[in-house]
Amino acid sequence: MTVTLIAVGLGIGLLVGLTGVGGGSLMTPALIFFGLDPLVAVGTDLLYSVPTKIFGTVVHARQRTIDLSLVVLLCIGGLPAAIVGIALLAIAAQHVPPAVLEGWMRKAVGGMIVLAAIAIAASPFLLKYRERESQPERLPRRRIIAVGALVGFVVSLTSIGAGSVALPLLVLCLPSVSLAVLVGSDIAFAAVLVVVSSAGHWSLGHVNLSVTVQLLLGSLVGVYVGSKLCRLLQQAWLRPAIALTLAFAGTRLL
């Protein structure tokens, strides 16, 4: 499996570098299709994404494209919600037969993949909405905390949503904030969120460390190469193609 997993990491890292599509939307279903238990796939993907998110946060911090107050509001909602999600998984593991819990997780992951596909397909329309709404505004604290709570809960259960769902919601809530700042702040929030969520899954025994290392060996190279190729390929057809692929993969898990 070593060569296969490195190749999977390389391919998904390449797509992430090319399109900016969240790795969780691609990695978790890939791990499930390769035979990992859905719970282990979620926990492994969360741990796998920790170094990537931290590295992205450092880059954005140097570029000064992180709004710390926005990150704090997202964490106020997201971290408690993530802990609640982990607690629900722990309770379910004690009272629900493993086969039933695995089926629930497959459906939850499938549903989030379909939602992520819709968010990716809708992103061009959201950017047009931003162009119309350009008036400066104060941060809507309650809405941002609510976005953080929703994303934190969903990510802790499925590992999907820190980028593919959170960013479109932030674009809707904060149309006047620079897109670069929204991306940087979302990555900084995700860096904190995946550490908490992966620690919770680790404590429940839902992480395969060997698989994580093998995926990272491929994905770090893939992200670098994809980022370099990003300027050469047309995003107009690549992102919709990925959205359709995710929608198909999601429906196969439902």
Image (cartoon, helix red, strand yellow):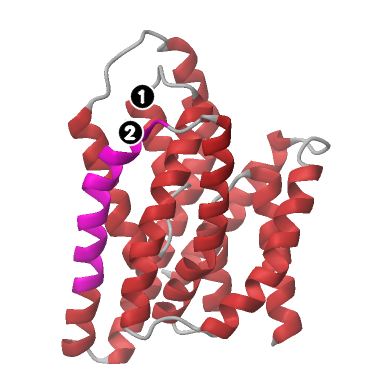
Residue 202, compared with residue 126, is above or below; it is: below
Q: Element type at marker 1?
A: loop
Nearer to the camera, 20 or 244: 20
Rendered location of residue 140, percent (x, y):
23, 25
Q: Which residue is mark 1?
A: 174
- Give me the C-alpha separation between circle 1 and circle 2: 10 Å
| Magenta stretch, main secondary structure class | helix
Badge 2: few (under 14), some or many (20 or more) residues near its Cα, within 10 Å? many
> Which quadrant holds residue 227?
top right
Q: Which mark is residue 138?
A: none
Nearer to the camera, 49 or 128: 49
Q: Which residue is mark 2?
A: 70
Horizontally, residue 140 falls left or right of residue 166, namely: left
| Residue at 73% in and 65% down | 10
| Residue at 59% in and 42% down | 59
Instruction: Inspect this view and state whether residue 161 appears.
Output: no
Rendered location of residue 214, percent (x, y):
66, 78
Nearer to the camera, 51 or 119: 51
Front position among marks 1 and 2? 2
For the C terminus, give its image quadrant.
Answer: bottom left
- Choose the circle earlier in sequence order: 1 or 2: 2
| Residue at 51% in and 45% down | 57
Question: How many badges with numbers are in the image?
Answer: 2
> Which quadrant holds residue 206?
bottom left
Rendered location of residue 136, percent (x, y):
35, 10
* Magenta run includes residue 79: yes
Region rendered in magenta: 67-87
Q: Amino acid at mark 1?
A: Leu
Nearer to the camera, 33 or 12: 12
Residue 125, compared with residue 111, is above or below; it is: above
Instruction: Inspect this view and state whether residue 18 appears.
Output: yes
